[in-house]
Image (cartoon, helix red, strand yellow):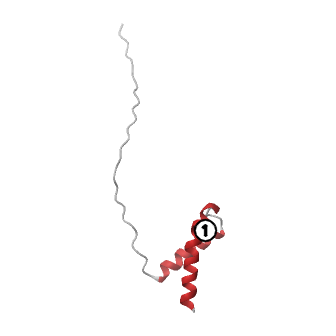
Amino acid sequence: MERVVEVVKTQRVIEQVRVEVTAEGRLRAFSDYASILSELSLRLDTGRIYDRDLASLTAAMTTLVDAFNRRCR
């Protein structure tokens, strides 16, 4: 009597695929900057930015506010 045996062999395959992603163009309109700053404000107010990430924003925000204040004088 013959018996059919099914063999399952698991093989791990790692494949690297290079994908080109087009970077979003530079912001050109004032409204682009305003909407991004509004979104950042909302995320800060609602706690959607982790406390651990606030330190990395501090330098950039300080630079932004300083530049804004110099421009508005």
Q: Residue at x 37, y 38 (%)?
A: 13
The count of marks equals: 1
- Badge 1 crowding class, 10 Å Cα cut-off, few under 14, some 14 to 19, many 20 or more, is few
Is residue 10 toward the left or the right of residue 34 in the image?
left
Q: Position of residue 53 (x, y in %)?
A: 59, 63
Please say if 6 is above or below 58: above
Q: Quadrant of the N terminus?
A: top left
Q: Position of residue 24 (x, y in %)?
A: 40, 69
Please say if 27 is above or below 73: above
Q: Position of residue 32 (x, y in %)?
A: 48, 78
Foreground of the two, 17 or 56: 56
Q: Residue at x 55, y 88 (%)?
A: 70
Please say if 72 is above or below 11: below
The image quadrant that residue 41 belongs to is: bottom right
Q: Residue at x 57, y 75 (%)?
A: 61
The image quadrant that residue 56 belongs to is: bottom right
Q: Position of residue 3 (x, y in %)?
A: 38, 12
Q: Residue furthest bottom?
A: 73
Foreground of the two, 54 or 26: 54
The image quadrant that residue 73 belongs to is: bottom right
**Residue under numbered circle 1:** 43
| Disc 1, SS | helix
Q: Residue at x 52, y 74 (%)?
A: 36
Is residue 56 toward the left or the right of residue 28 in the image?
right
- The amino acid type found where label 1 is placed reads Arg
